[in-house]
Image (tube, rainbow, N blue to C red):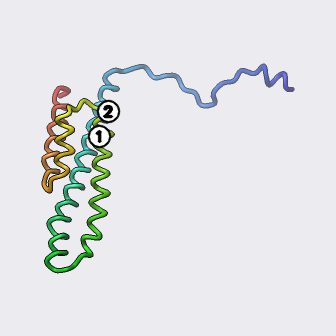
Amino acid sequence: MAQSLRNMAIRPMFSRPPRPHNPASTQRGTMDSRLKQLERIRHAALWGGATLVLLLGIAVPLKHLAGQSGLVTLMGPLHGMAFLYYLSTVTSNVTADDWTRTEVAQLIGCAMLPLGAWFSIGLVKRKAAALAGPAA
């Protein structure tokens, strides 16, 4: 019995034939994934910028003018998490793509300004247009 089991050919149970290589589909897949990465950066910039504007434009004035610090205790950590998410999204996507140091500095520098997120969104949109432009 043991001898017959050893002599049996071992085959994968769920094997399928390999698909032929299609360079156009892999290029399109790469472009789609790069556009999704840019979209992630854009959304992270939007959330980070919106929370900063809410924090500095509403919560801090309410704290100092009306003595209500509850909104600052809520918006402060939310903005902190949004900012860390933005930085992690930028660093993970910038290292995998062809970004110049100037563009990376603009993305990070714009995150420090109250309305700077909308400048970084513009940069990301221009990058996405340049990426999609040659393929069209």
Q: Looking at numbered disc 1 in the image, what kind of residue is underneath it? A: Gln
Residue 59: mark: none
**Which sits earlier in the primary sequence, circle 2 or circle 1?**
1
Q: Nearer the viewer, residue 29 or 45?
A: 45
Which structural element holds mark 1?
helix
At horizontal 22% and vertical 32% (from top left) the residue drawn is 99
View extreme (right): residue: 1
Q: Contact, CB < 8 Å: mark 2 with mark 1?
A: yes
* Whole-percent x, y for residue 77 in the image: 31, 63
Q: Nearer the viewer, residue 121 or 131?
A: 121
Quadrant where the N terminus is found in the figure: top right
* Whole-percent x, y for residue 59 in the image: 19, 70
Q: Looking at numbered disc 2 in the image, what kind of residue is underneath it? A: Ala
Q: Which label lies toward us, 2 or 1?
A: 2
* Whole-percent x, y for residue 71 in the image: 25, 72
At horizontal 16% and vertical 32% (from top left) the residue drawn is 130
Above or below, 112 relative to 74: above
Quadrant where the C terminus is found in the figure: top left
Horizontal arrangement in the rendering, residue 26 relative to residue 11 (left or right): left
View extreme (front): residue: 64
Above or below, 119 relative to 135: below
Name the quadrant containing residue 30.
top left
Q: Nearer the viewer, residue 107 or 7?
A: 107
Residue at label 2? 96
Horizontal arrangement in the rendering, residue 33 relative to residue 120 (left or right): right
At horizontal 28% and vertical 42% (from top left) the residue drawn is 90
Which structural element holds mark 2?
loop
At horizontal 27% and vertical 75% (from top left) the residue drawn is 70
Q: CA distance from mark 2 to mark 1?
A: 10 Å
Residue at label 1? 37
